[in-house]
Image (cartoon, grey):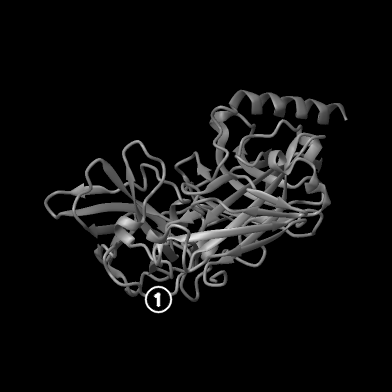
Amino acid sequence: MKKATLFLLLLTFYLSLSAQHIKYEDFIYDANIQTVLLHGSKGQLESPYLRLGSTEKLKLSFDDMSNESYLFRFTLIHCDHNWRPSDLEQFEYIDGFTEGDITNYAFSFNAIPGYVHYEAIFPRPDMRITLSGNYVLIVYLNDLSEENIILTRRFFVIEPLARIDVAIPYYPKNLEYTRLKQQIDLTIYATDFFNSEPQKRINVNIQQNGRWDNMKTGLKPTTITGQMLNYDYPYGIVFDGGNQFREFNMESYWYRSMYISQILSIPEGYRVVLHTGYSKAKKPYETLADINGKRVIKARKGQVTATEGEYAWVEFWLKVPEFTNADVYILGQLNDWQLDNKSRMQYDKHAHMYFGQLYLKQGYYNYLYAVVPDGEKEGDVTLIEGDHWETANNYTVYVYYRERVPDYDRLVGYLTINSREARR
């Protein structure tokens, strides 16, 4: 008991010490860490969420581009609806141990360069989550100090107490958006506990596909009728329609699939050159199948993906005029939806093209090109990809209720729906 109390005190100290440095988002802190996946038991395309009190599990996996293994540990941090750490102590939302060891690892085989593959399943019987809400998984080496954190990943624990109804009308309130933007008409049917200060205690976030940069946050009901909350804003809740995602398949380096121009064997492994991309901004909408910006890590038949899948530098070329006072980024789950330096493309004035490269493991990938004006944080995909009401986007609605004792945001509603299912 004394040891457990001491650990909690030390953990609280480390968290407070490094809180200003930890990013409570999907982020990799160590350049050696690659291909971080966190998903449900049904497969890589399943979003990372758990139902409170269920036996559901999440699977974490990642590669460490190292020639030796390490004992990595993980812990869980509860956050509010804006992804800021809650004021709760860990014992208030975790029953049992507050950290776990990642002991399942294997060295790569016949892969250049070599790496160590790690996997972990949680929650565990000795680490039960007792409250709903937003959570961040922190993986670290040895102790939870700033220099030892290697990655953070977001996930959700839900209490399905609210029913959510989403519609995307053909004619938006702003008729200038017709056939372009997607307006979210939202109604939430709440249970009795919503009768207590719903305007103050209810917050709704809406996410398009896996993006965080254009997420609508802190939405409040405009009218309340009994147990029905309406979100009827004068100009609507509007997202760019965008376009279907671009794609490439590099499950095998033995042949060039569609959208791959060259596969080169280099001392460091492979280099994959994609066919030059062009703007779709002024082209008609094309119905193309995609996986809404996600990725599926998978090697060719006969290979064990986890330990035999190989890495390649993937080159992206985009032939469009240079944007002034703005940068162009590659965007998708292939880079954790980050508009960062690794994803920013450089303009080649001689070739009149943008160039970027990412280090990726064998698999199937979706992506878009986004333009970010100087000083902005949200990407605009319409300037290169186009803008179409018909686009099949996934929308996820998160409904949070602010509890008073203890003081935290419960996640009482969660719905993912495709825009084609919501058309009205």
Residue 423 is situated, as x and y percent measured from the top left of the image, at: 53, 71
Q: Quick one: which residue is furthest to the left in this view?
A: 350
Q: Can you tell which quarter of the image residue 353 is in?
A: bottom left
Residue drawn 65% across the image and 48% down it: 221
Residue 215 is left or right of residue 197, and the answer is left
Residue 367 seen in this snapshot: no
Residue 103 is situated, as x and y percent measured from the top left of the image, at: 67, 49
Q: Residues within 10 Å of mark 1 (few under 14, many from 20)?
A: few
The amino acid type found where label 1 is placed reads Thr
Residue 157 is situated, as x and y percent measured from the top left of the image, at: 71, 51
Q: Quadrant of the N terminus?
A: top right
Q: In the image shown, does 132 or 39 lie closer to the viewer?
A: 132
Q: Quick one: which residue is furthest to the right in this view?
A: 1
| Residue 78, above or below 353 | above
Residue 348 is left or right of residue 2, and the answer is left
Q: In the image shown, does 373 or 86 lie closer to the viewer?
A: 373
Residue 18 is left or right of residue 1, and the answer is left
- Mark 1, residue position: 287
Q: In the image shown, does 371 or 227 lie closer to the viewer?
A: 227
Residue 18 seen in this snapshot: yes
Dot 1 falls on a residue whose secondary structure is loop
Q: In the image shown, does 95 or 6 lie closer to the viewer?
A: 95
Residue 327 is left or right of residue 150, and the answer is left
Residue 359 is situated, as x and y percent measured from the top left of the image, at: 38, 53
Residue drawn 86% across the image and 26% down it: 2
| Residue 240, above or below 284 | above
Residue drawn 34% across the image and 74% down it: 257
| Residue 55, above or below 30 | below
Residue drawn 30% across the image and 58% down it: 384
